[in-house]
Structure formats: structure tokens, C-alpha cells
Image: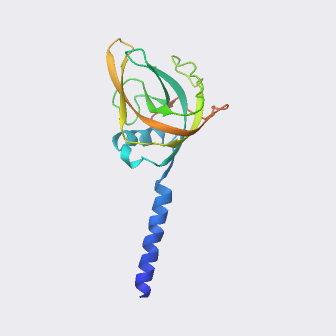
Amino acid sequence: MKKVIKKTFFALTVLVILFFCACKYNLTEDTFFLTMTNMQYYPQQYVGADISFDAFTYELTDINGEKHICVVRQCSAGYGCKCGKDTVIGFLIDFDGKIPAPKNQSEKNNDKTWVHVKGTLPHAEKTNFQIYAIDGTVETITFLTFKAETLDLIEDYSGLHYYVDK
């Protein structure tokens, strides 16, 4: 009887630990790129999980002229990126409050509108946008939608990197 009680207690403890640890993701400078890449391949693993990260606001205009506000980081052709060109990696943002306007989008520097975002991935469906690339061709890019509970402006973003590539 003691063995059954111990095994049951151990199993419940493991489940509680897995529940609380596996449902929260804090994307940092070191984990942003790999976690975002994993989210693109396996979004269902992240649905409903508490997620927080720092990114900059970005206005995306599709080929029909419709504007979409995203929170992103720049991805260079670093580790894991096979495209060989700069692109953004992040989320289409769903927030009930005011989203700070993007700044210096066309400039490749850290002087952006940085925000700290907390919320969840409400579903695993992706949204495809067709955009004009720099060379004038049409490209399709894909974003997951992030439901932000809080979105706070970051005044001192000196410790954040424009490019993420790990």
C-alpha cells in the first residue's frame, strides 16, 4: 500500500511540475529565435501558454494596401535561417489597448519602438500575408496571432538586440 501511495504522490508531483513549468515561456535574447522557429513548426504546443517577450512594433502592408501591426525581431541569415536575407520573426498582435506606433522601420538599427508583451497564443492557425519584397517580387509571409494581455513601452532598450540569430 505504501508503494502505491508513493507512486501516486510522485506521479501527481510530476504532473503539477510539468503543468506549471511547461505552460510559461519567457522569450529572452538567447531563446527568442529558436522558440519562435519552434512555434512556427509546432504552434499547437504553445496554445494557451503564458508567453512574454520583448520586441519592436512593426507595420506590415500587404499587396492590397491593408496595414497590419506586428511585434517582431529582425532575423539575419544566422543560425537556423536558410533564407540568406533579412526578414522579421514575430507575431501579428491582437491587443485591446493602444499599440505604440512603429518608428524607424526602414533603418537597420536598434532605435525602434520596443515593447514588453505578455499574453497567449489563442489558436494554432496561421495568417499568410502577401507583401512586396525589396526587389518588387511578391512574397508570402506567415504569422501566428498573439493575444496580448499587457503591452508596455520599453524606455531603455539598450540591452536588446535588433537582430536575433540563435
* Residue occupying the point 37% across, 43% down: 43
Residue closest to the eye, 162 or 68: 68
* Residue occupying the point 32% across, 14% down: 137
Residue 80 drawn at (x, y percent): 37, 36
- Quadrant location of residue 63? top left
Q: Is residue 20 above or below residue 59?
A: below
Q: Is residue 125 above or below residue 7?
A: above
In the image as oriented, which residue stretches furthest toward the top?
136
Q: Is residue 126 above or below residue 4?
A: above
* Residue occupying the point 44% across, 87% down: 2
Q: Is residue 15 above or below residue 135?
A: below
Residue 90 drawn at (x, y percent): 46, 33
In the image as oriented, which residue stretches furthest toward the bottom?
1
Give the left or right position of residue 157, taking residue 120 as reference: right
Screen quadrant of the N terminus:
bottom left
- Quadrant location of residue 81? top left
Residue closest to the eye, 149 or 106: 149
Q: How many marks?
A: 0
- Quadrant location of residue 62? top left
* Residue occupying the point 56% across, 34% down: 96
Screen quadrant of the C terminus:
top left
Residue 38 drawn at (x, y percent): 38, 43
In the image as oriented, which residue stretches furthest toward the front?
96
Residue 151 drawn at (x, y percent): 59, 36
